[in-house]
Image: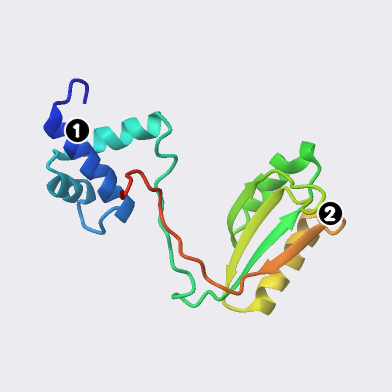
C-alpha cells in the first residue's frame, strides 16, 4: 500500500465506509469488499491487517441481536474486586461457558465501586440468577461486593465509525 496513488486512496476510503456497514455475509467477504471498493482482494486484506497492526481496528467480531434469538433475560454482573485479584478472577469468569463477555473498567468512586463486569445472556431470568449463584459458590465469590443488573431495553449495537458523514 506504500506509494498508493489517488485511486487507491479513494478505494481505501470506500473500504472504511464499507467496514462501517459490516463485513458482508458472503462466501468470500474480502472479494466482495474488493468489488465494492475498486481494490483488489489482496489490497483489502492488506489494508485491514495494517489497520489492525496500527491499532485503528482493535478487533473484528459479530454483533448478534440476542433478543431476536430469544435471549431476553440478560444480566450484567458487576464486581468490586481487589485490584491485585481482578486479572485472575476475570480470566476465571471468562472461561465460564455462560459468560458471554467479561472485562475490567475503572471504578467511578464514590458512586460506582465496581471494576469487573461480566455479561450473561439468557432466555429465563431465574436460570440466569441460578447460574450466577452457582458461579459464585464455585469461585468463592459470595463475600465480594457485587450487583446484578438485568437489562430492560436493547440498545442499538454497531461497529466502529471511521469516516465522517459530513
Indicate the quadrant containing the N terminus: top left, top right, bottom left or bottom right: top left
Residue 88 in picture, x, y percent from top left: 71, 41
Question: Tag 1: Cα neighbours inside 10 Å, few (<14), some, or many (≥20)?
Answer: some
Q: Which residue is mark 2?
A: 144
31 or 56, nearer to the observer: 56
Kindly identify the residue that appears in the image at 67 percent across and 53 percent down: 117
Side of 68 where 3 appears, left or right:
left
Side of 149 where 159 appears, left or right:
left
* The image quarter in which residue 49 lies: top left
Which residue, as the protein is rendered here, is positioned at the far front?
Answer: 166
Callouts 2 and 1 close, C-beta under 8 Å: no
Give SS at disc 1.
helix
Residue 122 in picture, x, y percent from top left: 58, 72
97 or 115, nearer to the observer: 115
Give SS at disc 2.
loop
Does residue 125 lie above or below 43 as drawn?
below
* The image quarter in which residue 2 lies: top left
Kindly identify the residue that appears in the image at 48 percent across and 69 percent down: 66
Does residue 54 lie above or below 123 as drawn?
above
Residue 70 in picture, x, y percent from top left: 49, 78
Kindly identify the residue that appears in the image at 20 percent across and 48 percent down: 33
Question: Tag 2: Cα neighbours inside 10 Å, few (<14), some, or many (≥20)?
Answer: few
* Residue 9 - label: 1
Q: Earlier in the sequence, mark 2 or mark 1?
A: 1
- Distance between the Cα atoms at labels 2 and 1? 52 Å
Side of 59 where 75 appears, left or right:
right
Amino acid at each position: 500500500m506504500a506509494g498508493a496513488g489517488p485511486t487507491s486512496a479513494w478505494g481505501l476510503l470506500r473500504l472504511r465506509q464499507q467496514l462501517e456497514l459490516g463485513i458482508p455475509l458472503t462466501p468470500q467477504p474480502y472479494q466482495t469488499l474488493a468489488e465494492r471498493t475498486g481494490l483488489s482482494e489482496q489490497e483489502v486484506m492488506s489494508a485491514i491487517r495494517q489497520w489492525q497492526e496500527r491499532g485503528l481496528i482493535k478487533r473484528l467480531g459479530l454483533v448478534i441481536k440476542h433478543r431476536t434469538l430469544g435471549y431476553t433475560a440478560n444480566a450484567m454482573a458487576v464486581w468490586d474486586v481487589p485490584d491485585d485479584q481482578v486479572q485472575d478472577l476475570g480470566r476465571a469468569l471468562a472461561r465460564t461457558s455462560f459468560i458471554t463477555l467479561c472485562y475490567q473498567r475503572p471504578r467511578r468512586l464514590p458512586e460506582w465501586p465496581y471494576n469487573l463486569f461480566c455479561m450473561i445472556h439468557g432466555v429465563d431470568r431465574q436460570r440466569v440468577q441460578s447460574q450466577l449463584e452457582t458461579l459464585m459458590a464455585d469461585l468463592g465469590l459470595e463475600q465480594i461486593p457485587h450487583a446484578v443488573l438485568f437489562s430492560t431495553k436493547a440498545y442499538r449495537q454497531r461497529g466502529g465509525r471511521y469516516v465522517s458523514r459530513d
